[in-house]
Image: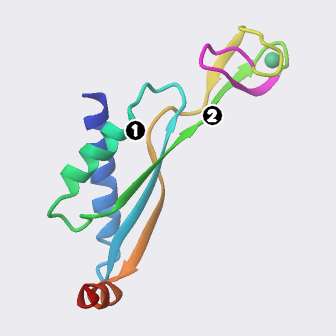
Amino acid sequence: MHELSIASALFDIVSEQAKRFPGERVIGVTMSIGGVQALEPDAVRTCFTLLSEGSAIAGAELTIERRPIVVFCRRCEAEREADTNFACVTCGNYGVRLVGSQAMSVEKMTLRSRENTMDESHGR
Ligand SMILES: [Zn+2]
């Protein structure tokens, strides 16, 4: 149910943001999530589609980006990307500390004015 809670939080954020643009329709959403999170992108997308059905953001296409795992490596004494085992990709050291948020965040929303949308539906 992890995916559902992420999709639900995403839906709340996007719905709230969409209210600021009453003349426009949300056609695309890009979210990112920390690389440590175990996540099934398809499941998030399905949940998001179901939640948004019949709402102001229905039909918005969801793109999910994974942020790299970033750690502070004690050997490199710098922030480095790490693999899924939390080993520094530069030196392979495991003496690392996870930095950066793993939370979901909305990166981008694509809007289209409702006028254009109307034109499109006439064409069908
Ligand atoms: Zn390192």
**Residue in view at x 43 percent, y 25 percent:** 38
Instruction: Single out the mark in the foreground, 2 or 1.
Output: 1
Earlier sequence position, callout 2 versus callout 1: 1
**Residue at which label 2 appears:** 68
14 above or below 66? below
Q: Residue at x 35, y 40 (%)?
A: 42
Alpha carbon separation for disc pair 2 and 1: 16 Å
On residue 41, which mark appears?
1
Q: Is residue 55 left or right of residue 96?
A: left
Mark 1, residues whose alpha carbon is within 10 Å: few (<14), some, or many (≥20)? some
The answer to whether 80 appears left or right of 67 in the picture is right
Q: How many numbered circles are shown?
A: 2
Q: Quadrant of residue 17?
A: bottom left
Q: For disc 2, does the CB lie below 8 Å from ligand 1?
A: no
Q: Quadrant of residue 85?
A: top right
Up the image or down, 123 lies above or below 46; here it is: below
Q: Position of residue 86 (x, y in %)?
A: 64, 15
> Which residues are drawn in magenta?
78-88
Residue contact between numbered discs 2 and 1, judged by CB atoms under 8 Å: no
The three-letter amino acid code for the residue at tag 1 is Pro
Q: Callout 2, which amino acid? A: Pro
Q: Residue at x 30, y 91 (%)?
A: 119
Callout 1: SS: helix
